[in-house]
Amino acid sequence: MALLGCAAESLTIMLQFPNPSRSYDASRHCVCFWGYDNSREITFMVDDAMLRSLQPGVGSDERSVLGVFDEFRDKVLEMALKQYVPGPQNRYSIS
């Protein structure tokens, strides 16, 4: 039983989002933000169309898209946690 507990602990995802920074990438039409798994930085890009689907009718300009990201930050971070898999990949796209 103790061995199972150790195995379960080693599978725990350590992804955290201590940095509230985010930026809009107009060329990719996405908001970029970063998570950390121990010392590894993981880049996430959430498609602006996905963000606009969370708040229909919002504009497509940078300020509007970043505003939606800020309003739905917890939901977006939840999506990022579900998508993240520990390993060599350090970039994820949420669309």
Image (cartoon, grey):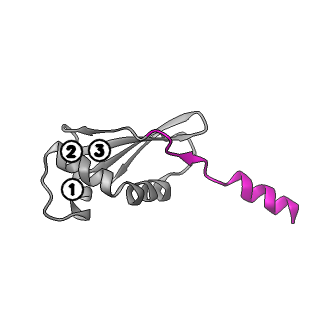
The residue wearing badge 1 is 49
Decide: marks 1, 2 in contact (CB < 8 A)?
yes
Q: Residue at x 13, y 50 (%)?
A: 60
Q: Nearer the viewer, mark 2 or mark 3?
A: 3
Q: Are there few (<14), some (14-19), or many (20+) residues within 10 Å of tag 2?
A: some
Q: How many marks?
A: 3
Measuring from the top left, give residue 48's x and y in whole percent.
Answer: 23, 51
Look at the numbered disc 1 and give the secondary structure of its residue: helix
Measuring from the top left, give residue 46's x and y in whole percent.
Answer: 32, 50
Q: Kindly report the distance in space between the C-alpha atoms of the residues bearing marks 1 and 2.
A: 8 Å
Measuring from the top left, give residue 41's x and y in whole percent.
Answer: 50, 35
The quadrant of the image that shows the N terminus is bottom right
Q: Nearer the viewer, residue 12 or 20?
A: 20
Question: Residue placed farthest to the right in the image?
Answer: 2
Residue 5 magenta-drawn?
Answer: yes
Say left or right for 65 vs 84: left
The residue wearing badge 2 is 29
Q: Are there few (<14), some (14-19), or many (20+) residues within 10 Å of tag 1?
A: some
Decide: marks 1, 3 in contact (CB < 8 A)?
no
Q: Which mark is residue 19?
A: none
The boundaries of the magenta stretch are 1-19
The residue wearing badge 3 is 31
Disc 1 residue type (three-letter): Ala
Residue 18 magenta-drawn?
Answer: yes
Decide: marks 2, 3 in contact (CB < 8 A)?
no
